Image (tube, helix red, strand yellow):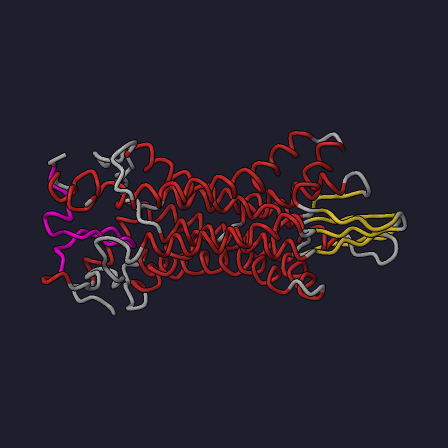
Amino acid sequence: MSAPTAARMGLIACHVCELVTRAPAGGAEGHCPRCGAQLHSRKPHAVARTWALLIAAVVLYVPANIEPVMITSSFLGTQSDTILSGVAYLYHSGSWPLAVLVFTASILVPLLKLFALSYLAASVQRRSRANLLQRTRLYRVLEFIGRWSMLDVFVVMVLAALVNMGALANIQAGAGAMFFGGVVVLTMLAVESFDPRLIWDSASLPAIQKEVQYA
Amino acid sequence: MCPRCKATLYTASNNSIDRALALMLAAAVLFLVGNAFPVVTMEIQGRRTEALVWEGAWRLHEEGETIVGILVFLTALVFPLLQIAGMLAILIPLRFGLTPRYLVPAYRTIEEVKAWSMVEVFMLGVLVSLVKLAHMAKVVPGIGMWAFFALIIALAWASSTLNPHEVWSRLEMSEPEPAR
């Protein structure tokens, strides 16, 4: 792993416009000469920020799944649905492809984000040199799928807006929707604040430096 | 391709600005139509309701779920609007060879806003709600829905056509001094 890297050659890529420039002398952080964005060789405090946002997301994840996201009332009575019971309802009402879709977007994807990003952050802290390429790919998957968890929030919004007929039929958003929206936003921010280049930094650490790190 | 992590670094394509501009103009029209006409119309026992995006967000606010309302309003309406208006404000002057000072910070802002513009997720949500409602009521997709579907295609096409490196290098050529 002795290939020259930009960081070792004193170069910085702007993460907005991707222009590669020479880093300012003395390790000071400057602005991109082309687009004016703040330049960092690595995002500042990436791992700490990722953990902070992740922990906040985990805290919200509990009420997001316990509290009802949707309250349906009609002349037949009132029914509260959590995210999971909403999926169960879709499954039992015969639209299982849709149930699979909502299950993936609302349950699998948030869980995957929480676990996978924790794994990425922890492995960077341990300076792991295993599965570098796979971990980078995992990060790109997380970046891509994050937004799709908003699906359930939009479903609640459309239903609440349409089914609005007083005693006949009425659908209201529940507190769970707010917590769930919070989880989606926080995990998206957590993914954004992580820096995948950190994964490769431990790969290019010289052996001696590595021993010092472990001591 | 990045030799290390295999991400695509650069795709060569020039004159992408003309095509992207045409697609963004189409997107602007579709966005207006999508927000002016109801996305879905529902009928239960002769009573009809229709919903526009901002009405849905407002209804969430009225029910006390203001935060959810704001989140939906931003991701389904404000950020897409910013993305479309911003891209037009950049591509039109560039098309005519002009580079006013606001272009650089504007393009930077749009690149950062893009992740939060979720028209396609919103439309999938509309489809799921349609299926959920089909059991209890008669639901009819409105003009707004078709406009939104076309909008998704136009936006995806525009962003795959536009080569950001071309925009940046044009901005760079015309402006040796950075705008701070």
Q: Quadrant of residue A26?
A: bottom left
State the quadrant of the N terminus of chain A: top left
Relative depth, front residue between A62 and B147: A62
Could you tell me which residue is drawn at 21 percent across and 58 percent down?
B172
Relative depth, front residue between A66 and A138: A66
In the picture, measured across the screen, residue A65 lies left or right of residue B178, that is right
Could you tell me which residue is drawn at 63 percent across and 57 percent down?
B53
Residue A39 is one of the magenta-drawn residues: no
Could you tell me which residue is drawn at 12 percent across and 55 percent down?
A22
Q: Which residues are magenta?
A: A3-24
Residue A16 is one of the magenta-drawn residues: yes
- Magenta segment, principal secondary structure? loop
Residue A138's spot in the image, x, y percent?
Answer: 38, 36
Residue B32's spot in the image, x, y percent?
Answer: 57, 57
Q: Quadrant of residue A49?
A: bottom left
State the quadrant of the C terminus of chain A: top left
